[in-house]
Image (spheres, helix red, strand yellow):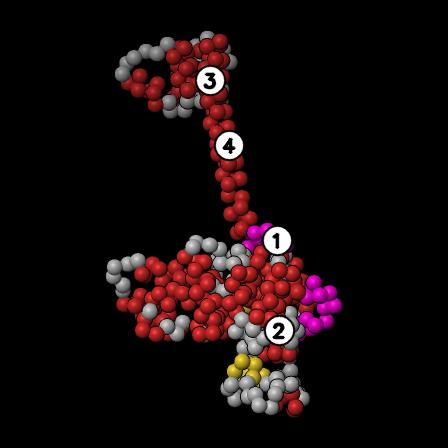
Amino acid sequence: MKKNFTSYREQLLYLAKVYGVVEIKSYANAKKRLSTSQLELILIKNKIKLPLNRLNSKLIAKLELREKSITNVWLSLFFIVFLAGFITSRPYIKKIVNEVKFTYVAEEYKQIDKDSKKVVKKNKKVDKDKEKKITKPENDNTISLNVQTTINLFTDLEYDLKKIRNGQQVKPVYFTKLPKDIKSLGDTSQKKNLFIQIVLPLILAENTKILEDRKKLFKILNKNFNTIGERIWLKRRFKEYKVEDSDLAELKTRMDIIPASIAIAQAAKESGWGTSRFALEGNALFGQWTWSKSAGIEPIDKDEDKSHKILAFQILRASVKAYKNNLNTHKGYKEFREARAKLRQEEKKINGLELTKHLDRYAATGREYTKIIEKIIVQNDLTDFDNAKLLSTKSKKGVSL
């Protein structure tokens, strides 16, 4: 119902009452009379639309313009801050999106792998002569994806070595076995790239763990007092790195990374880029020997006076871990560790190519072996991966396939 007003002032007072303008009410309580212009100004200040028959139109228009200008300034500032925040957070948002995509796609392929295991015949016949020469690890229930499925997975994850060389983080996909049909890849370059894509996350995962342990070690050493938990942790690290007499200097020398370029090159050499019998049947990437009668793969062309086997593993990562432990603890690689420690002391980059010459005792051919490793590193630009980092997902465990 429309209300009839006897004056313009009465309209203004009515609007103040309807909208509950406290300022006008306080003036009324103090028995102070406000002019019509003052009433208009207060109503405008409170963003209340005035009746059409205004008294001081120019002044009112000016004040309204000022109010609108102030509002526009605040809106502009808010928009600029929002835009700046969006631009700044874009890499973070992109990283989160990549992590979500990685988790979704990797888990999808993991389910495919699980489904494949269900259809594998448990009692598959094995050639008797071959069975005598191979002693597989117990409880071997893993299965390898084929080459095309592996390529599809890496494509879906946008896991590209060119991007890794340009600084993109490596997706933590941990293969338990190499593709069984990797030999079928006729393109040598494609086969090499696929092999690197498979072993790189495994190598970086071990190096990441070493760096975390190394950081914790130095944190403990810089403290005046260590807790019981820290002392137990130290005791376990001395045992892991085979350090006698609790020699902290020796532990610091041994507890360090193996450059990715060296690890990839040696894995490529020892496994024939993932095509050797030892790699495909025993997950043996680095050709490590064992004299155990219960484990390992016996070489077919082994000399009669030799009793060694090639150490077999349940999964590929176990092979990488054993290789890391070998270089960091065996007395034959003392020079390698000392050269690496020297680079640390001089605050230089841990360069794989520079350290290869200290691995001459890894094979019987000595210096010729290290030349081959150097050649593999140079020809395939493997030092590009010495700075590679793993994508840090929420689980920090990655996905095993």
> Looking at the image, which residue sits at the far front?
367
Q: Is residue 179 magenta?
A: yes
| Tag 4 residue | 80
Label 2 crowd bin: few (<14), some (14–19), many (20+), radius 10 Å: many
Quarter of the rendering containing residue 115: bottom right
Q: Residue at x 44, y 72 (%)?
A: 329
**CA gap, disc 2 to disc 3?**
77 Å
Compared to 164, does 326 lie above or below?
below
Numbered disc 2: secondary structure: helix
Quarter of the rendering containing residue 261: bottom right
Using residue 164 as the reference point, say whether residue 323 is left or right of it. Answer: left
**CA gap, disc 2 to disc 4?**
56 Å
| Tag 1 residue | 163
| Tag 3 residue | 66
* Kind of residue indicated by mark 3: Arg
> Looking at the image, which residue sits at the far right?
186
* Kind of residue indicated by mark 2: Ser
Using residue 228 as the reference point, say whether residue 364 is left or right of it. Answer: right
The one of 339 and 13 positioned closer to us in this rendering? 339
Q: Could you tell me if the residues under marks 1 and 2 are in contact, i.e. CB atoms within 8 Å?
A: no
The one of 66 and 328 positioned closer to us in this rendering? 328
Circle nearer the viewer, 3 or 4? 4
Label 3 crowd bin: few (<14), some (14–19), many (20+), radius 10 Å: few
In the image, the segment drawn in magenta is 162-191
Compare marks 1 and 2 and give the one earlier in the sequence: 1
Picture disc at residue 271: 2
Compare marks 1 and 3 and give the one earlier in the sequence: 3
